[in-house]
Image: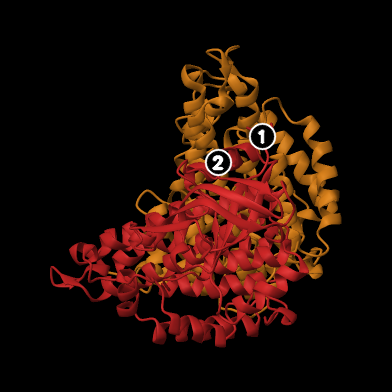
Chain colours: A red, B orange
Amino acid sequence: MNLDFTEEQEMLRTMARDLLQTECPKTLVRELEESDLGYSPELWKKMAELGWQGLTFPEEYGGTGMTFFELALLVEEMGRNILPGPFISTLVCGLTILEAGSEQQKREFLPKVAAGEMILTLALTEPSASWKPEHISVRAVASNEEYVINGTKLFVPDAHVADYLLVVARTEDSTRPEEGITVFLVDARSPGIQCEPQLTLGLDNKAEVVFKDVRVPKGNILGELNQGWKVVQIAMTKGTALKIAEMSGGCQASLEMANAFVKERVQYGRPIGTFQVIQHYLADVWGKTDRTTHIAWEICWKVGAGVATPFEVAAAKAWTNEAYKWVTERCVQCHGAIGTTRDHDMGLYYRRAKVAELDYGDTDSQMEVVAQQMGL
Amino acid sequence: MDFEPIAGTEELRKEFEDFFKEVMKDAPPGWENSPDDLATDEGWAFHRRVARELGKRGWLSLAWPKKYGGLGKSIFEQLTFNEVRAYYRAPGVDGFGMAMVAPTLLAMGTEEQREEFLPPIARGEVTWAQLWSEPEAGSDLANVQTMAVRDGDYYILNGQKVWTTGAHNADWAFAVVRTSKELTRSRGLSFLLFDLKSPGVEIRPLPTMSSHSRKVEAYFNEVFLDDVRVLVKNRVGEENQGWAITRATMNFERSGLAGLGGIRHSLDELIDFCKETRWRGKPLSEDPLIRYRLAEIAVGITAGQATARHVLWGQHRVEMGEAPAMEMVPRASSMKYYQTELDQRFVYLGCQIMGLYGQLKRESKWAPMAGKFERLYQSAPGPNIYAGSTEIQKNLVAWIGLGLPRT
């Protein structure tokens, strides 16, 4: 055990923090929230030049060979600053291709992701709004050298800008729901795909994607036929960990903002941070943020090392879900009325906290995994 | 940063486990190592016996320098011991002597004091009591009124202490007393050690709400001091400099990991109970609300453990001289009240799950889990108050962790 950062890790954190502050001010965040694309292609390109999209890919696929933990530190800074766009969506799929893909798929997809030329996303959830394999109803049926996909995906992040979708489809009926599922790499421009972004609380583009007789070559199966749920689990574990890192950064930023505010805001002739009631609110926020930061680092390190248990992943997400919402709510309270306005930055975090809870598994679904893992 | 298991602690863990597994076979029935358990004659005798066994093995002085009878181990090995002992709910450790007096003397005692007082602590032969709080000095400890007046080689002590855990069983006391009438508040205090059998010491029990009958003795006491003579050489640190001593007991493992492990052990027992118990036609464990609330406690423990590892690491850095001790204060304060409140929530959940049965004492043949939660319900609020109340801990986080002003 060594809980100090390496010099390299410290540098990565500082560099990311500084760059995001300069390149992605809150004016740009608000602008991107209102835009159709939802991200800045210029910034996306700049990030690729810095090697962010390919941070953890081996050099042979255009990456820089750093660890998943280091990627999580980068994502933590994105959460702290807020960086709208498809970074987590793309990286989750990229890392899943790296782990489950064929050599050909890796050579085809990863260098493009690393170069900032390809956006990916996982199309898993459906109108059933469930993370469980028994609720996958999109079907793929074999037809000569192709599969034909039909059905509707919902809540697909960043689908409107994605180049490829990792589509989770049922290819065989089975008594065990996790059997008979297959993941396909689907060109988002294939005929028969209709993508309709839905406005969300996070202004972050979750889409309905309708597949009508969409034809996919057999070579585009990611992993094994009918064994796709294992591939989904790879993506979900990595996505959950990165989401936790992002949320942890958001908690830290909210606390810093509120702490600075209560030292400046004067009422009754004194800064409100001198009142014990405010001090105790923020002491609680400090503690919750501290624990969120630590559980985020730990789960990201463990996921990277391949030693995280399903209990640990679910517990970390359940914790962070509730912590981020609670922290941002308290920080809005410390700001008073100004914290509730569109012009103030607190609302950007407060809204994201609820949406982030839902991404990669809301609290109720995570708590049920925790319960099952404890033998209940 | 990495979270690999700490090197070299696994063999030691096995040794500790083998010991505690064996020794706990002789525990009195229904043993939980609670203050109430220790307040019975049988429980106290068991504690003393285990203490001597631990002393023989050198495990009460694991992290002390070898010079004073210690084994010279690190904070990580101390943690391993604390974790295993917490899991088995074993007695045998006098928290006051081992976790407060010994680190204080190692840091600030004279050579003579170390040689006199450390070996009996290491052997598990002496029990210490903490004489700090007074009727007018609870959270506001600097308001201590007990006076110590110099008389040649002695101080003459007069005053009253309160909330003294285990004073009736203790041999020695470490007290904060006022040695100057002119210097106010924290400036006029000194840190004294004295024998509780000294003439003029009177100890009266102060029953808590759980002390319901002759079967359960009080573990709190009031201690009255009437012209008690204490040797000046038993003062730790300089006269009127005692305040600094009260806040300098760092080099003892206080991560809270052991305590969180203890809650997890109790949670696992409650889970087993819920799986085995069918009420109204189905196992409790199938009730969605019960599942959610048990999971919530487990999640809380997991998050606490994540930060507790950083407390431990921070203490290690302080020990190595890589960080100032002050850096640790907000995190340790935050974890103190986080842990006591989590434990309290767990206890209340246990009571809730027991339903009507939750009111039964262990004497009732109908009491589930030997009436465990009936007892814990009464002791649950205490930890939020003692050893620095939740409110005091929040102040420290706000002032030191957030740089908010003291007013």
Q: Secondary structure at mark 2?
A: loop
Q: Residues within 10 Å of mark 2 (few under 14, many from 20)?
A: many
Q: Secondary structure at mark 1?
A: loop
Q: Amino acid at mark 1?
A: Gly
Give the label, 2 or 1, closer to the camera: 2
User: CA–CA distance between discs 2 and 1?
Assistant: 29 Å
Quadrant containing the N terminus of chain B is: bottom right
In x, y percent, where is residue A210? Answer: 46, 52
Residue ID at (79%, 67%): B72
Front-most of residues B245 and A370: A370
Front-most of residues A57 and A246: A57
Q: Is residue B211 above or below residue B127?
A: above
Q: Which mark is residue A375?
A: 1
Q: Amino acid at mark 2?
A: Ser
Q: Is residue B350 above or below residue A2?
A: above
Q: Which mark is residue A137?
A: 2
Residue B369 shows in this picture: yes
In x, y percent, where is residue B328? Answer: 54, 69
Q: Residues within 10 Å of mark 1 (few under 14, many from 20)?
A: few
Q: Do the residues marked 2 and 1 share a common chain?
A: yes
Residue ID at (30%, 79%): A27
Pointer 1 chain: A
Q: Is residue A240 above or below residue A126?
A: below
Image side of residue A82 versus residue B220, left or right:
left
In x, y percent, where is residue B61? Answer: 76, 59
Image side of residue B371 versus residue A323, left or right:
right
Image side of residue B363 versus residue B75, left or right:
left
